[in-house]
Amino acid sequence: MSNRLTLICGLVLNVLLTALHSASGADAPDTLRLTLPREFYAVVGQDMSVYFDNVVLTQTPEEYQFKVQCPLGHSEQRRWTVQPRNEDVGVHDFELTVSHPDSVDQARAKCRLQIVPADAGRDDNVTLLIVGDSLTHATLYPNELARLLSLPGNPAWKMLGTHRPTSAAAGVQHEGYGGWTWQRFVSHYEPNPDGTYRKRSSPFVFLSAAGKPELNVGRYFSEAGARPDVTFFLLGINDCFGADPEDPAAIDARIDSMFEQADALLKAFREACPETDLALCVTTPPNARESGFEANYKGRYHRWGWKRIQHRLVERQLAHFDEQNQLETKSRQGRLFLVPTELNLDPIDGYPENNGVHPNATGYQQIGGSLYAWLKWRLATQN
């Protein structure tokens, strides 16, 4: 066989092997981009899970092996899950290793699991504000948070907010509006509101003495007659959804723009109520089914496109807000926290078949459970 023919055969074989490897779904470790927060939280008697699809970047999570090393809980096919007992209260190491049967390539990450008692914060009073987009507007996870806080062993609670949809349970109100972004909360002013949520200004934007719209969080709380102990923010989907998933630089540019607006709103909150904890909820993962995106967007947007954007957004949220938290902690003004709402949301059973980004009742309950677990941990650390 001539050298030229040998070279051609070698090239063909290379192409075939590459195609076979790609078909097997064996992503390289750096493309899996396994992402865990610094820590996550659970409460005695309440379920908490880590869904594997939510922490790796692959279209075929079912082809991988996920091994958890933790003294508590157990692994199932799609998740690790735990329902802590009283004797489990404390801090536990959590390590996740991902491997592919046809490859030695692995990804590994570590974090901490914080478990707190069921009666953490029992004798406290806590005032809450929730700021968000359509996931908050649906009001199902604020309702679940209220239900959990109404169980025995919890603090007396109150929610602030000017928006109380008909679906809101007793005492539940918030600032959650479909389609809203960090920027809209920072700057949107509607000169001719019609009394509905569809045509209104940001609740934090008012006309100044000079007749110009301005961000004024202090006035919002003055008119509310109270300041929150904790403000939750669950935003990011509308800020970044329209980015080009094929262009990593465009995704990062969109996230950069979002952070500018987020930082502006958070700064205004710090100035207006420096004693308030600002709890940043990590942007939730998509429905695992393409059918949900097809039902909503008719081929314009796809699950894998949003998954790539959302995963990059999560990576950067964890880094950006954790860095700010560390800086604030060093200056003894640490009031910024991350709530890992991306972990405990079932991307299959937590979504309907016909929606790409909005969970079903089960999924919203899981989001509410994540907020509750973080809040109970925070109450425990203050006592």
Image: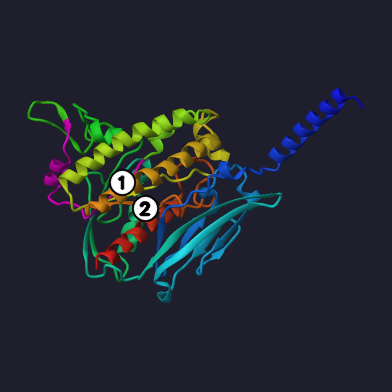
Mark 1: few/some/many CA within 10 Å (<14, 14-19, 20+): some
In this orientation, which residue lies closer to the viewer: 92 or 128? 92
Direction from residue 11 to residue 104 in the image, left or right: left
| Whether residue 231 is situated above or below residue 117 in the rendered picture | above
Q: Residue at x 44, y 33 (%)?
A: 241
Q: Distance between the residues labelled 2 and 1?
A: 14 Å
Q: What residue type is labelled 2?
A: Val
Q: Which mark is residue 339?
A: 2
Q: Give the range drawn in magenta.
A: 214-235
Q: Does the magenta stretch include residue 228?
A: yes
Question: Residue 313, image x and y in percent?
Answer: 43, 40
Residue 247 in view in this figure:
yes
Coloration mode? rainbow
Q: Which residue is drawn at 37% across and 41% down?
A: 134
Left or right side of 120 for 91: right
Q: Which residue lies furthest to the front in this view?
A: 3
The circle on residue 324 is 1
Three-letter amino acid code of the residue under disc 1: Gln
Quadrant for residue 181, please give it: top left
